[in-house]
Image: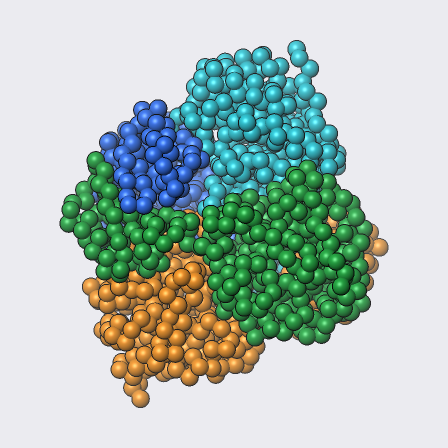
Chain colours: A blue, B cyan, C green, D orange
């Protein structure tokens, strides 16, 4: 990552570029307030640009005569970049620290469908050793004909789940107008994959005073994901957790393809915690356990899992929910793998 | 597309399925209020489901014993499907009809940067023979450090552009709270690629009383695109124009890959007009003309093009804007190709 | 494209790089026989590398201390690059010139299934105004249980088709051992999408004395495609025709997604003709005509179409074949669009 | 998977289909020797097809009147499918059993560059606890200007590596004509990602008498991968090891995207061992260890890793090779994770 005054773009001239061609590039850059540093090699000239890189990106430099390539150097994000914050961040979620060195389990129902279903799922999460509860009151569905969530009543049930188990909670927020309400009930706001670049929503979440979990867009690059986190961070807080949840590829054997490489690759670029959602990645129950194990082995700081007391009656994503029979063995495996890669279980929140 | 009472899902049992296995599927379906029609073939049994398909989709049917495949039959969208509306729709945009049989050009600046730039771009669009003006007051940028638009002042300039040229206008709207304001200035609301599944925004646009242009998400399937249009349509109006603008693939020679097949394929599934944005598809000026020509040849009902009087000073997407030198020849080619495929130029709006 | 002695790689140091770090890069490059030109800007140092770029690519330069980026400048292909061959090439296929300025139709059966079927399809191609016949004797099938072609008997029928119609022919070759035989029957050898990087096969085709049509790999970048063409060209001949045939994406509404942008983008990089196969791109008959029209409009030098006298009996790709009812109107449209974009119909081969 | 006589395709008629429409489908199927079983539901008719499914696939059934969908049921591969071979296969590689229940490490140089380099890399592999040596004499390079391998001399060195360490070996074979030679030197033949659908090569490998490692094509679905394995298996041997090595996606932060879900998903479909190559997946050294750990945690039966005594001098893929400093800790972690998921280290080959 670059700081003010750094070269953040490089223009490579081709071997036939003359002085006039080079001057033209320099003038274009200076015209928008930038500085251009010309480094003439024996055969090829390279021009480094200092100033407002976002502005340079809009210039049609690549179409000028004898410009061979225009290359962005340095990272377009700043606040979330690891280069200026070497220490990995630990994000406090209602008393549970999520971040490097520890391993956290987030579990609960995909959607809150009723008080009975949600409370039972919360108890399953607790038995499994989870540290944070999930449960959604607002659902983001591809079809307008699908179940859209219990809204405010769902948030009230979420609060009961937290009181009953002593665990902090995470829930999705869908639009800017809902942020304040949702933040008054949950400990961690989640922005979903389809909203990763809903910048008005990101800004509102950044101002909420609560930490934010940002799911990766299913077709977003790691750089775009970090730029979206930068939108949140600019509002004042870097209490942000990044969640990989599968990307869209040509493979149709599963709903999405978990990009396991994104875990170590993102951690190398940012100081923020990186976690994995193995339930939504595959959309298939039989893939949840192997993907959860892989996530921990790759260095994820937490995993987030859907559980349901009776998936046959689920109103949302029943095909991927784990049941009581599945969870004990999985938790044992996950903690063993965490230990093998040098991570301790997170500390449970102190009961209020 | 299926109507109430149709079979919309089929469960295929494997060859070892016994009566008890078949009964189990039937019971699961009936438990959520559905009906199951069992068709026992010589070797394999197939069960057709009638009822609430969205509800069936949440059942873990695929995990039941001896279920081989669970297949959705029929389309999940209804109001925008061609099957029940055989006539292609023509959408009236401030007096210009966009739809089958005609060819419309939409042109103007990507972003409204200043009154002078925007008015000059509007005149360029007019000289080119365009029917509708584009120009954005709110920009959706991947980076928080990029130019974000002139907001309300931009909308005022858009209105002036319309008055000066007599052309109706289209502009982007970014969040639900802005819909009413934007609708009071523009003739057509545009929802951008990153917002294709921002359902609260879609709903608000659907209630605005103005037609809506829905860009395809850069990693959305055609089915998801039509489902998003269904969210708009459910609010009461099917005045919706679908805009293909390039999808995300592995190829990095251009920003996105124009999915030209989506034009005929979407038109086969929906009665809505389908148009193409060749400027944002490639992000490269040299690709705009060939992609625009290809779009018309493939049957697009309109194309939307960025023009700029001086791309060197553009605050947004300068590398792809056409200039005055480019547009006359392109327009001639486009109208010739439209004729070759049986389309007439759209009628210009009658001046108020 | 770069010539011997050009800088073809640039190493960008980060802002904390000291002299020792820069020296280390220089030493690594010199150790493998290269030269390094250091251009120290005010804040950041950029090092240009001259020498064996392929060799530099194997060096772990990006892992050296304070190296921020390692960038390849210039193109890795030489013989097929447009930069050194400004004139577009015209490839002579048995008397038909394929290339810029003209428009060629290649048509015929996907597979040669029988003499009757193939001769009838050849006559259909002729009626349509096609210039070159297609017809495969060897089929490359994903399943070992699918029809694999008539082999040598198919080649004999191909020869008869050519004699009957006076048209030159193109057919697929699957393995190096078959090249000589196939080249003795056909005028143009085709390398299929799954073989685009079958380099032993490419080399053998390059030595055959016949021109080569190289289909793009369904997940290959344009650069990889041109590198594959370079393998052929290095054997002595640049009589190579590039054929775009759809790439693999997330969209499942069609078999592959025609990458229409690849036509103008590849033509900007290479002097070789670029053509399109609209039949295999979509795998759906209803898409063939719109995609063929789009290809011509985008500047393709030829299109290649499957026709079949009776698709119900086809042994290969029946769902996409055009019939006698489809072809006359399509040909009229294609020639009209070709004219609109400044292309004349190719000249038919003089009958022997 | 289906057996002879099973329904393998289902044709779903739409709700307007009359008897004549249904008859037409039946006749088309019978015309190519198939049987059609009509199951009329209350509202919709479903027709099951029994016979030669590959033949049915070529019929244009989907274009017949009132056919809504044509669905393939059952799997197109047979010999490699798990359904008929419930027991997971263990493949014997020169005395080392690769398969379920055990965990095997394959390590060695990417390319054999010289006797000294290769022998040193072999010793590194041995120190790490590897069971099988890798080392390539023939390299498949995107550029014709890259190092292409030492050919026969490389095979001789591979043999020395094996004699020195007592370990069996795996090496790549590029074309059918080389199979016999390569099989006389190596214990396991490897078919590379770009050759996954080089069917003449697959057939030749299947006849060689040696086990075959089949890398997944970088844009191949799991089904295509298993179909390719079926080509090998049809030649008489199911001693086949499947190797996931990263797929092509839009993400450009790494060379390819490791598809970790493919490990459990493929193992559910086939009885063959499934392994992972974490070195070529990412092409980045810092990703090798996390991806290797993830692979074991997800259930991979083996991993294959590039090691190099001095990556600075590597002629191929230097940026991803592990060095002596990296391997001891990694091996410890991998064996610990293997234990956590219930796998024992493979048994080393008994020294001849």
Residue A125 in sight in this render:
no
What is the x, y in percent for residue D201? 52, 73
Residue A233 or residue B79, whichever sits in front: A233
Residue D199 or residue C20, whichever sits in front: C20
What is the x, y in percent for residue D229? 52, 71
Query: B288 left or right of D108?
Result: right
Task: Please give the name of the residue rendered at 21% of the width and 66% of the height, measured from the top-left corner.
Answer: D324
Displayed quadrant of residue C176: bottom right
Query: In the image, is residue C334 above or below residue D210?
Result: above
Q: Quadrant of the N terminus of chain B?
A: top right
Query: In the image, is residue C218 above or below residue A19?
Result: below
Query: In the image, is residue B292 above or below residue C246?
Result: above
Query: A22 left or right of D250?
Result: left
Query: B167 left or right of B172?
Result: right
Task: Please give the name of the residue rendered at 37% of the width and 28% of the height, measured from the top-left corner.
Answer: A28
Query: In the image, is residue A122 above or below residue D193?
Result: above
Residue C124 in sight in this render:
yes
Residue B125 or residue A351, whichever sits in front: B125
What is the x, y in percent for residue B313? 42, 24
Task: Please give the name of the residue rendered at 79% of the width and 64% of the height, measured from the top-left corner.
Answer: C164
């Amino acid at each position: 990552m670059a700081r003010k005054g750094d070269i953040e773009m490089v223009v490579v001239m081709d071997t036939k570029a003359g002085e006039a061609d080079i001057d033209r590039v320099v003038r274009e850059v200076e015209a928008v307030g930038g500085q251009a540093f010309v480094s003439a090699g024996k055969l090829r000239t390279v021009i480094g640009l200092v100033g407002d890189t976002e502005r340079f990106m809009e210039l049609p430099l690549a179409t000028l005569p004898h410009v061979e390539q225009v290359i962005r150097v340095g990272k377009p994000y700043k606040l979330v970049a690891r280069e200026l914050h070497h220490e990995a961040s630990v994000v406090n979620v209602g008393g549970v620290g999520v971040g490097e060195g520890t391993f956290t389990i987030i579990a609960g129902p995909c959607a809150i469908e009723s008080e009975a279903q949600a409370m039972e799922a919360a108890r399953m999460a607790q038995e499994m050793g989870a540290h944070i509860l999930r449960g959604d009151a607002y659902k983001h569905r591809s079809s307008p004909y699908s179940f859209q969530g219990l809204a405010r009543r769902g948030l009230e049930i979420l609060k009961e789940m937290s009181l009953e188990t002593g665990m902090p909670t995470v829930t999705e927020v869908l639009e800017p107008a809902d942020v304040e309400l949702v933040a008054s009930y949950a400990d961690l706001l989640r922005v979903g994959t389809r909203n990763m670049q809903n910048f008005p929503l990101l800004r509102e979440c950044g101002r909420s005073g609560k930490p934010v979990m940002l799911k990766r867009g299913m077709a977003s690059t790691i750089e775009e994901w970090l730029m979206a986190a930068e939108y949140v961070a600019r509002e004042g807080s870097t209490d942000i957790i990044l969640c990989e949840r599968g990307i869209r590829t040509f493979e149709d054997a599963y709903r999405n393809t978990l990009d396991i490489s994104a875990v170590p690759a993102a951690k190398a670029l940012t100081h923020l915690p990186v976690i994995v959602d193995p339930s939504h990645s595959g959309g298939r129950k039989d893939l949840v356990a192997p993907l959860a194990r892989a996530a921990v082995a790759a260095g994820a700081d937490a995993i987030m899992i859907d559980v349901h007391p009776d998936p046959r009656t689920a109103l949302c994503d029943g095909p991927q929910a784990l049941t009581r029979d599945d969870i004990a063995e999985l938790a044992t495996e996950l903690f063993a793998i965490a230990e093998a890669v040098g991570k301790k279980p997170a500390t449970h929140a102190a009961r209020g």
